[in-house]
Image (cartoon, rainbow, N blue to C red):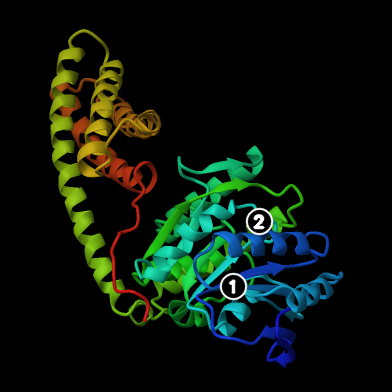
Amino acid sequence: MTTAMLIRDGDCREALRPEGPAPVVDVVLPVYNEEADLSRSVLRLHDFLEGHFPFTYRITIADNASTDETWAVALGLAANVPHVTAFHLDEKGRGRALKAAWSRSDASVLVYMDIDLSTDLAALLPLVAPLVSGHSDLAIGTRLTRASVVARGPKRELISRCYNRLTRLALRCRFSDAQCGFKAIRADRARRLLPWVEDDGWFFDTELLAIAERAGLRIHEVPVDWTDDPDSRVRIVSTAIADLKGIARLRRALAQHRLPLAALGGGRAAAAAARRRGRLLGQLVSFGLIGVASTLAYAALYLVLREVMPAQAANALSLLVTAVANTAANRRITFGVRGAGGRVRVQSQGLVVFALGLAVTSGSLFLLRRFDPAASHGVELAVLIAASVVATLLRFVLFRAWIFPQRRLRTTTTSLP
């Protein structure tokens, strides 16, 4: 039995806290009306930690405004199961529950996972080990890598991928899975970041990660095996609307420099920005050289084909051939992607970019013919080269943001103090 005390604590109505030394890891389980599953999940997690986890731990049940018997079940677990504690909030919100739990914790590493334990618990040690060692500042489970094994419906899969793609485009995020309910953070980093995270709901995760990444903190990703909970309480439409509002708000805050990123990252934000600028410059040079070679090849092929076919057909075929070669060269040289994995996907996306380039160049030919029907092949070529420059800039943006999204920079540091 856990030695504990029932107290009133700030915005918590009451909390049950165990006595004893601070653990290394505090695993927080935010819950709302989970009386049916709470005991089973907590006991399963407790058995796993007792038998397979090398660090001292605590399990914290964060009951945020449940209206059923969840709090009563939580009290029973905290009173009778070692290393389990609980507190109750009068207001809902996953973000609010995590802020309250993490702010009060005396552990070195703070974890949270969904109460349904959708993530295979074998991923817990790989999640926290880089934080305990000091290799990383935050760690997240990801369901969106080839190494992940995910069982969920196509609707949720599509929504998840669209949302994460949106965060990459709108917030320039490089982490792959913002909303997986399986994350960890070093407690000292949490104390810096939490006051600047405004959202108290489902957008909390994305906002925390986006600010941390912009501040130059290191985010470690762990592929997970995930089985979706068919009884999920998430309201997709209202959550999506709230997330879109959160993205717009955070984007404004970042654009207006309202967040003290340098202080939050301990000076790493400037270093990370410098590395990104250096990498961007290198990619621009490489992309430009490949683009010049592609344009010369395109021009030569166009002049040859133009002798035997109409301008639009010669343009389309020349652009198609050089676009495939251009995509393959940029994949390997500019963006450093090796191996055969993902090659079909990259070329498929490259063909979409090719179609946009074709629209730009074909449109320029159409306008030329409309205003100068008697234009020579040389004039045609000059107009096409100018249009190709525009298409090339568009291609670089899409390559970098969509086809070859930038991964986080891997660095190391000293261990936890």
Q: CA distance from mark 2 to mark 1?
A: 24 Å
- Horizontal arrangement in the rendering, residue 258 relative to residue 33 (left or right): left
Q: Nearer the viewer, residue 266 or 15?
A: 15
Q: Secondary structure at mark 1?
A: loop
Q: Which quadrant of the figure has residue 303?
A: top left
Coordinates of residue 66 in the picture (x, y in percent) = 80, 72
Residue for point 72% across, 67% down = 31
Q: Going by the image, does 215 lie left or right of 329?
A: right
SS label for mark 2: loop
Task: Identify the residue at image location x=28%, y=63%.
Answer: 411
Quarter of the image containing the N terminus? bottom right
Q: Find disc 2 in the rendering and name its residue.
A: 117
- Percent coordinates x, y for residue 77 in the rendering: 76, 72
For label 1, the residue is: 199
Quick one: 147 or 278, which is closer to the camera? 147
Residue name at image x 25 percent, y 10 percent: 309
Query: Residue 372: where, in percent of width, then height?
Result: 24, 26
Q: Nearer the viewer, residue 201 or 401?
A: 201
Q: Is residue 201 left or right of residue 323?
A: right
Residue 7 in sight here? yes
Kind of residue sitting beneath label 1: Asp
Q: Is 72 placed left or right of 251 in the picture? A: right
Callout 1: few (<14), some (14-19), or many (20+) C-alpha neighbours within 10 Å? many
